[in-house]
Image (cartoon, coloured by chain):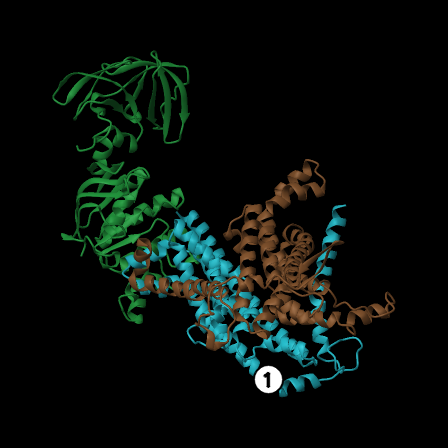
Amino acid sequence: MNDLLRRYGKGLTWTFIGLTFFWLIILVVLPDFKLLESSFRPYLPVTEVGGPKDVYSFGNYLQIFGNEVDFNFFGLHFPLAARIKVFVLTIFYSGVVTLITFILAYPLSFYLAKVVSPKSLPTLFLLLFVPLWVSEVLRSFAWYIILTLKGPLNVFLMTIGVISKEIRWIDGYSPVVVTLVYAYVLFMLFPLYNAMQSLDSNQIEAADDLGAPWWRIHWRVILPHAKPGIASGAVMVFMLSAGSLLVPAIINSTTGNWFTQTIQGIMLEGQDWNAGAAFAFMLLLFCTIAVSVAMRVFRVSLSDIAK
Amino acid sequence: MQINRKFLGHLYMVLFLVYLLVPLAVMSGAAFNASKLPTVIPWKGWTDQWFIALYHDNRIWVAVRNTVLVAIAVVIIAVPVGAAGAILVNSISGRVRAVLYGMMVAPILVPGVVIGISTLLFWHQFSVGSGLHLSVLGQVSYIASFVMLLVLARLQSFDQGLEEAALDLGASHGQVMRRILLPHLYPALGAGAAISFFQSIENFNVTLFTRGGADTLTVYVFSKVRSGITPTINALALLLIMVTLVLAVIYEINRRNKARLEAAREAEGRRAEDAEMVAS
Amino acid sequence: MSAGIDLDNVCCDFGKFRAVDHVNVNIQPGEFFSFLGPSGCGKTTILRMISGFTEPTEGVIRIGGKDVRGQRPNQRPTALIFQNLALFPLMPIWENIAFGLEVRGVPKAKRRERAEELLALVDLHDSADKMVSQLSGGQKQRVAIARALAVEPAVMLLDEPLSALDLKLRQHMRAELRAIQKRTGVTFIYITHDQGEALAMSDRVGVMSQGRLQQVANPRDIYNNPVNGFVASFVGENNIFAGDVQNAADGMASFATSTGTFRARLPGAAGKLYVRPEHMILQSTPGAENSVPVTLTEVAFEGNFISVHAVTDSGKTMVAELRNDGSATIPAAGTQMHMAFDARNAAILPDSATAGA
């Protein structure tokens, strides 16, 4: 504080503090408290808001139960509430997306960091950045076009004779996963690349020189070094996937519902803002837990992830 | 063996770029296909009808205008707010710093749905109705985090001695800010403004819940996909891709020129250094 | 326009640590004064207190007779040259130099004119529109000096500004700094840990250790008549003998050590005996007084002098430095010889100034 005053003087210091207060308190903290507070309120007609029926309860949270459906998880059948099922599947498939993006991005980031000549890097990065310059809604839309029943993929496969009848690609969770992977793979690639780039190439050569096979070099030298990058990329992709509304909504696979779509239904179609708040808060709580667990497991700090 | 593995690497790189770029090509190509559905196969002949339709589609242009206005507002608020946060975090230490930093980074990881709903509910209690002004506030809450990270990174390469030198030469705190610190931060502020602008244009989740009845581009495209699409959207997409690509290339050329200029200056500095060693 | 500086019982604490401890010194207007000491001795804190970036915990600082406590750096008639120079990398050279004028509202044409004048003063013509990165280390040094001079300070404060330069260039810049100081007549306060720099440039030197000023004197006296062992050791090499004072009279004394009993000066309190290596005489026959038989262990030819290490019968190592006058024969290691020194060149000194002294 004294340091601040000495460096910037009274006027500027209070300007900085005021702007930061506006951001963190007015735009972030207070709205989240309001979200929590609203989530315990019942859904009432406008005239009854503040009346005797307007008391706090867990009613909104309990809405996640009920409407039991059959849940088939790797051959295991058991009954489960429909909304819990969507919640669980959203998390599961977000994990799948994260894993696939990692598998796709790992070899490429190694290639960029250690194999390709540094001269061609700027050009390669410019090309890699092209999809990022293109809006997410358009990228999702591109896959929607590709995957539709009369779309290019089916026509192409039929023309070369791989399939004889059009396949309904937009069914279940696979099209959502495919599109999410496409949308977010670069968020895995760049942190991985940054982490690997900082690895001293001599370490790899030393391991090679000591006779380690390539997979062992990766497992023992490169992978541990890239750990903060993996954590950063994984957290980013997982959060973006679990919180994505655009991709599942555009793909619009009726048998592949995302939890964000449930919230959207309650908020905009049901107009029950308090129940929406409860569901949004569940998502926020889950994300907070997921990030903290990831930080513990990978032993990284928030500043590593934020890179 | 070594050559082989290198070749596999190049092959993978090419395949990956194809994977990234083909969907965009498919989408752009559909803008010129005479088919009523947005697709490239079957090809029903060249047409410019979708661009003409786009030109006459007033709702799209209203959405474009809204999007740009929101993005400009977000830049105007998020850049100073994020920069102030970064300067604050940079000049304190210890526990308070860790807590503040955590609070500033966290919004990046909060799902947009949550930000949208909480912003809506919070302002609603003060009878501030939904509309694009709420979209701006909701977007700023997490976009300012990106600005903060960029400015903080730049601040870490700042020599605090420069501030002291300026103060010592008689500058006021305001003059130090304007002549010394801000010029050092300009690249980060510029990058922050660009990222804020694009993040705002990109935004869907926050906007969807806070927009009221107004359209932005993402929301409009989304509603079109739902209610039956014509390749007008593809025409729009192609235009957007072209604009952003041109901007990206200009930015890159500009950056390279500056880097070259700076490299030339440093080379001159080294030559002067060598000359001095001989002379002294 | 140059001003004197009085430090009156100045102390500075950082938490429990006392960085500067009761420092008293009067620096004359137009003087070149150096604070010399190892890192962490408090010399930089003194500089920051004079410039206004740090406030003293106790004591008074006067610049030109006026108490400056509470004045901010930009209100004091001082200009600081930073260790890393702190030139503004995004401004061309002339704007760097004219920055102090710019913030005082001097019109642009006038600023430019003054910048050119100062560039000429520091011997840097045709560099006004270059950027900082285009200059060499020595040129940057001159720009920093010109920038500080532009605000016409009464006092210039220099925080080890030569430490980033190569040895040869550093020696060249010493003469230059000294010349600029004489030309401008501004009071220079110079901070350094390099005794060569301090002795070569200064009118007076203040040697510091652990926050305390040990001795203030002109360079000759600092080197030839150090007041204590710390000063003697910090400004040069010594042969040091522990022992006891016997028969002290008229500033001279006999000093009994395990190597023998020597005559030496006794300027103040008792302590150890210090003799500089260049005051050691090496001869084949025993001297009249202060002479010890030794065996040479190592003889190193260093160019302008010859460094001789020897050991006495009692096992004490002694060092002598012989001037290379071009004709002297260089003795070989293993030779038996005698080392002697003049009593006037040896002093019995206490370790260092004790607290409260």
Q: In the visual, does C321 lie left or right of B5?
A: left
**Residue at the image point whose x is 31% and y is 70% from the top:** C108
| Residue A254 position by quadrant | bottom right
Residue pointed to by mark 1? B59
Q: Position of residue A293 (x, y in %)?
A: 56, 49
Residue C280 visible in the shown view: yes
Figure colour of chain B = cyan
Q: In front: A239, or A262?
A: A262
Residue B72 percent location from the top left of the image: 48, 75
In-image side of B14 versus C302 (left or right): right
On screen, residue A210 versus residue C62, left or right, reads right
- Where is C31 relative to C152, above or below? above
Toward the viewer: B273 or B212? B212
Along the line of sight, which residue is nearer the eye, B274 or B208? B208
Q: Which chain is green?
A: C
Which shade of the palette goes to chain A?
brown
Q: Position of residue A11 (x, y in %)?
A: 30, 64
User: The N terminus of chain A is located in which quarter?
Assistant: bottom left
Residue lying furthest bottom? B56
Q: Position of residue B255 (x, y in %)?
A: 53, 65
Element under disc 1: helix
Residue drawn at x 72%, y 80% is B32
Q: Count numbered badges in the picture.
A: 1
